[in-house]
Image (cartoon, helix red, strand yellow):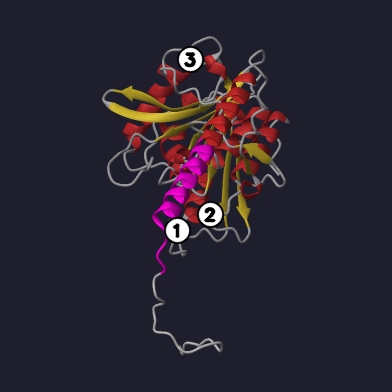
Amino acid sequence: MTRQHSPRGPRFPWPWPRQHRHRGEVSRRSRRRLRALAATALGLVLLLLATVAVLVDRSGEPQPEAEAPETVSCDRYGLDGVRAEARGPGGPTDGTMLDSRVFGPGAERRDRFRLDFEHEGITGNYHVFAEGLDWDRPVGVVYHFHGDGAFEYENPEYTASCMAKVAEEHNLLLVVPRTPDRSGDTTWWEERDLNAEWFVALVEERLEADYDIDRSRTWLTGYSGGAQFISQNLLADHLDLVPGGGAIMMGGGQAPRSPDAEPTRDQLEDLLLRWDVGTEDDGTDPQARFDALSAAEDGYRWYERQGFEHARIRYREGVDHFGLPYARILERTLTAAEEDGQDAA
């Protein structure tokens, strides 16, 4: 860049000649700077003292109310326009500070998360959603079995929170166990017999001891691998877990191979067994290679042949493995049961 010269005089060499100041002038300026710094420091100290005084004076005042708990939309789970409290570890109702076998006053009426249960060397975990139930009336129970990967367990603030809202409306405790299987993928069906033994022990030794459960309203619900676990193990070998109520298999629910359980006449007449599956859930999706459509049809037909009078299957047109409205399926089935076993809409 070309430097512009002053039009008033000749060109001077660059840089400009240094101008020297008298020593006394420098000393006076230094003193002024020191006085200015001292004044600034004093002002900051006074401001800090005033702030502390205000905070101390307000310590006895009532604090503003906490913001409303975070909520989750249940639209994707079939409850259009409904928002549920996002419930999970660390939330306002988390009861995990207590040992899972020790209750303080009213602790059984709180949500409790990531509790441990060990049976014959096998350890698994579970959540319990108990907030909002009317314990002066009979309280039933919903056991929900997650799909492969345990999303419903690992992220209770989503699917499980919306299902808990439905369960609460029907005065049902919601329990979401995590499979004790730790080999390979996180599934219910790979070590199904051991997993079933662990779950039965959890119910009999822990949950029915901790909670006054109305067993005549017992519901098993499961998605994908969880649905397989219900139809191939729990209903087939441990049907005494469900003296009343029923089971809901979503996105799966195949027939058992060699069942051991003998259903009672009352179970054949009263239990509601529901299969719910999408017509696009046929294993052709690269993200879902499991043919849930065929599995659900297989399970439904097998249980119907065994004489279960209220076995039903629902096909959802155009729905794939990831589009089932879990919470609405639960709500419609529970409502149907309360209306004397009418078919779920």
Distance from disc 1 to disc 3, alpha carbons, whole Å, reads: 38 Å
Above-or-below relation of 26 to 47: below
User: In the image as oriented, which residue stretches furthest toward the top?
Assistant: 105
Q: Which residues are magenta?
A: 19-41
Measure the C-alpha gap from mark 2 to mark 3.
35 Å
Q: Quadrant of the N terminus?
A: bottom left
For residue 322, the mark is 2
Per the image, the residue denoted by label 3 is 210
Let me know if residue 217 appears in the view.
no
- Count of marks placed on residues: 3
Q: Nearer the viewer, residue 85 or 212?
A: 85
Amino acid under disc 1: Ala
Residue denoted by label 1: 288
Q: CA distance from mark 2 to mark 1?
A: 9 Å
Q: Are marks 2 and 1 in contact (CB under 8 Å)?
A: yes
Q: Position of residue 59 (x, y in %)?
A: 61, 19
- Residue 266, compared with residue 84, is above or below; it is above
Quick one: label 1 or label 3, which is nearer the N terminus? 3
